[in-house]
Image (spheres, grey):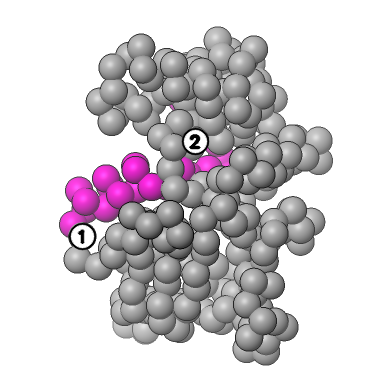
Amino acid sequence: MSPTQPVIQVRDVRKTYELGGIQVRALRGVTLQIERGEYVAIMGPSGSGKSTLMHILGCLDMPTSGSYRINGVDVHGLDEDDLSDLRNRHIGFVFQAFNLIPRTRALANVALPLQYAGLPKPERLRRAKTALAMVGLSDRADHLPSELSGGQQQRVAVARALVTNPAMILADEPTGNLDTHSTREVLDVFGHLNRQGRTIILITHEEEVAGHAGRVIRVRDGRIVADTGDDRLQEAVA
């Protein structure tokens, strides 16, 4: 793989759902490229297609037409096992609800993806400790989620996303359940990781949160209508 290979290449992607006999066009020809090391926020109101785009970028759904490559790999025609492997190797997910296992300590929560990948326990623990250190939580490794603040729980979730060394972190409304202080903690972590060269894609409806990204993409009615990384779309009208 070329070191200049874009992490994300989306070409004329369309997604149509069938709901009660009615066709809903969630995406209407989205073209998008995200380079390695970018920090991108994707914004849009409810029903804009933002969540559908996130699911396709995360290989959780497939486009009806168009092409999508992640790290140079074309997802078209991949079966569910191949898609699962692609997600595990290339994408680190962070969700609004944290999704930590309640009775499992922070270190074990972070190491879990490596267990699924079949790595031996000493290597799992070593990499999990490194990931916790990257989000500033080395001293919370033995704590249960219930013993952590909301911001700390989300930072554990970020460490879990990092532990497989993915091509990108895909974060879906990661600050939606957090107070102002915890939001700042989590955004500081994303900023630090991006400065280290990590590719961050943040899905959010909050302007203040999106303002931390280096590039903001706005989606409306299934189309990209503004992209601060693409002069052709600057302040475009749908």
Residue in front for this viewpoint, 13 or 98: 13
Residue at numbered disc 2: 162
Residue at the image point whose x is 51% and y is 55% from the top:
36
Position in image of residue 83 (x %, y %)? 27, 53
Residue 120 appears anywhere in the view: yes
Position in image of residue 164 (x %, y %)? 41, 34
Residue at the image point whose x is 72% and y is 83% from the top:
235
* 80 in the magenta segment: yes
The C terminus lies in quadrant:
bottom right
- Quadrant housing residue 27: bottom left
Residue at numbered disc 1: 78
Q: Which residues are magenta?
A: 79-101
The N terminus lies in quadrant:
bottom left
- Quadrant housing residue 73: bottom left
In the displayed structure, does residue 182 sit left or right of residue 29? right
* 70 in the magenta segment: no
- Earlier in the chain: of badge 1 and badge 2, it is 1
